[in-house]
Every structure is written in C-alpha cells, then in structure tokens.
C-alpha cells in the first residue's frame, strides 16, 4: 500500500491529510487566522494517532510547492522537511495550481469545462494563474496576471471556462463573459492525493536539503525606521 502524508498551507486555509493508494483516509483543516505554524504538525500527529500509525508506516511526505504566501509555504515546507529528515522518507511537491485543478473535479462535480484556470490571489487585481485542460494538462506557464475585462478572452471564446481558487471571486465582476464560471475556494490537502500519487509512482522526488517553494512575491526583509534606543 502507498501511504502519503499531504500538507497544504499555501493560502489562508491550513490543511493536512493522509492518502492510501490515492484515496483520502484522514483529513484536518482550519481557517483560523495565522494558525499554520501552530496547527500543521498537530494535525499530522492527530491523524497518525487516529489511524494507529507512525511516520515510519508512511511512504512519502507531499507538500504544496506554491505559488502561495511566504509564511504559509515556509511552515508547510519546514514541517515536511522535518518529517523527511527524521524518517528518511522522500519528499514530493505538488503545485498549488495543480491541486486546484484536481479540486475542480469535486467542487464542480457533474459539470464539464473546456478549460480550467486556477487562480491564487496576489492582492489587488493580480493573480497567479495558468490555463489547464480538463484532464489536468497545463497549457500555459504559471505567471502573474493583472485581471481586466479582456483577460483569458481567447479561451472564453472557445467554450466554458472554470476559474477556481482564492483569487477567483474578485474576478467575477471584471470577467463578465457568459462562458466564465467561478468557484471561490482555497486549495485543500485532500485534493493533493492524485497528483501526489502520480509523482510517487514516477519517483519525482525533491532534494530535501535544497528544495524551495514558489512564493507569490520575492520576500524582502526591511529595517524599521523607528528608533528603539
């Protein structure tokens, strides 16, 4: 049996899951503000205890590789690396946009679309996005997009398009084409099962020591101008 720990902390929702042969057997999530650091490891421990398992009983650890928030991704990746270093298990990384495309199958069950466009909020009217086919094949590069009324026009002219993610809702008032459909949601660890399983079978493992996630923006440290002394 293939058993994988799944960690998704790229947006405001903190979630973790355990999958067995591509099926979710345990799941935890919380939308509490800024709780990723305090909850991620707790969720994993709770699920392992619930199933009577140890980390040694798992085959790999999978974490979201972004794009996403700096803090959230750092928490998820640090937790995943700690588990992998301590247990010797391989590290898998799944793109946040791939997770949202997989999630579309359950969020929009029974509906078919010509294209799926996952969106991660990058503030104001900017999102990180890419265009996917319904079977999960990525058609365009992942890139920042400033949304206006003409965004993704060529795909909308071809048929129904599903925009999904935490950046989708704010675009509904701007992209008004009749073929545009929107689902506002956060990526969930439970939607990582199939992409993680495929990566495990193909042995697409990351270097635990050097792996870095894909942040929305480059993190820049600043120096306070306030005089403390």
Image: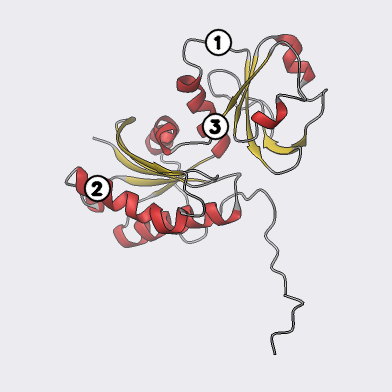
Q: Residue at x 21, y 52 (%)?
A: 54
User: Please, is residue 198 above or below residue 85 in the view?
Assistant: above
State the residue position of label 1: 112
Q: Nearer the N terminus, badge 2 or badge 1?
A: 2
Q: Residue furthest left?
A: 52
Nearer-N-terminus badge (3/2) = 2
Nearest to N terminus: mark 1 or mark 3: 1
Residue 47 in view, yes or no:
yes
Q: Position of residue 102 (x, y in %)?
A: 49, 27
Residue 179 lies in what quarter of the image? Answer: top right
Q: Which residue is mark 3?
A: 185
Distance between mark 1 and mark 3 Cα atoms:
18 Å
Q: Judge whether 181 appears above or below 197 on screen.
A: above
Q: Of residues 24 and 210, which is closer to you in this image?
A: 24
In the picture, measured across the screen, residue 155 lies left or right of residue 41, that is: right
Q: Quadrant of residue 199?
A: top left
Judge the density around disc 3: few (<14), some (14-19), many (≥20) Cα neighbours within 10 Å.
Answer: some
Distance between the alpha carbons at the discs numbered 2 and 1:
36 Å
Observer able to see residue 207: no
Residue 169: image location, x then y, percent:
65, 29
Q: Mark number for residue 48?
A: 2
Percent position (x, y) of residue 53?
A: 19, 47
Quadrant of residue 197 in the image? top left
């Amino acid at each position: 049996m293939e058993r994988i720990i799944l960690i998704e902390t790229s947006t405001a929702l903190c979630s973790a899951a355990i999958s067995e042969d591509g099926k979710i057997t345990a799941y935890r999530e919380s939308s509490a503000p800024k709780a990723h650091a305090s909850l991620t490891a707790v969720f994993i421990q709770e699920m392992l205890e619930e199933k009577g398992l140890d980390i040694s009983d798992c085959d790999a650890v999978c974490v979201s590789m972004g794009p996403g928030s700096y803090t959230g991704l750092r928490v998820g990746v640090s937790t995943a690396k700690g588990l992998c270093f301590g247990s010797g298990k391989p590290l898998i990384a799944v793109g946040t946009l791939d997770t949202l495309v997989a999630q579309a199958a359950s969020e929009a069950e029974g509906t078919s679309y010509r294209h799926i466009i996952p969106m991660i909020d990058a503030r104001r009217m900017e999102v990180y996005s890419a265009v996917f086919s319904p079977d999960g094949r990525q058609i365009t590069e992942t890139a920042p997009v400033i949304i206006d009324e003409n965004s993704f026009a060529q795909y909308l002219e071809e048929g129904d398009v599903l925009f999904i993610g935490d950046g989708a809702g704010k675009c509904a008032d701007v992209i008004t084409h009749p073929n545009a459909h929107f689902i506002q949601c956060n990526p969930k660890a439970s939607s990582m099962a199939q992409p993680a399983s495929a990566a495990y079978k193909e042995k697409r493992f990351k270097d635990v020591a050097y792996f870095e996630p894909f942040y929305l923006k480059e993190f820049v440290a600043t120096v306070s101008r306030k005089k403390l002394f």
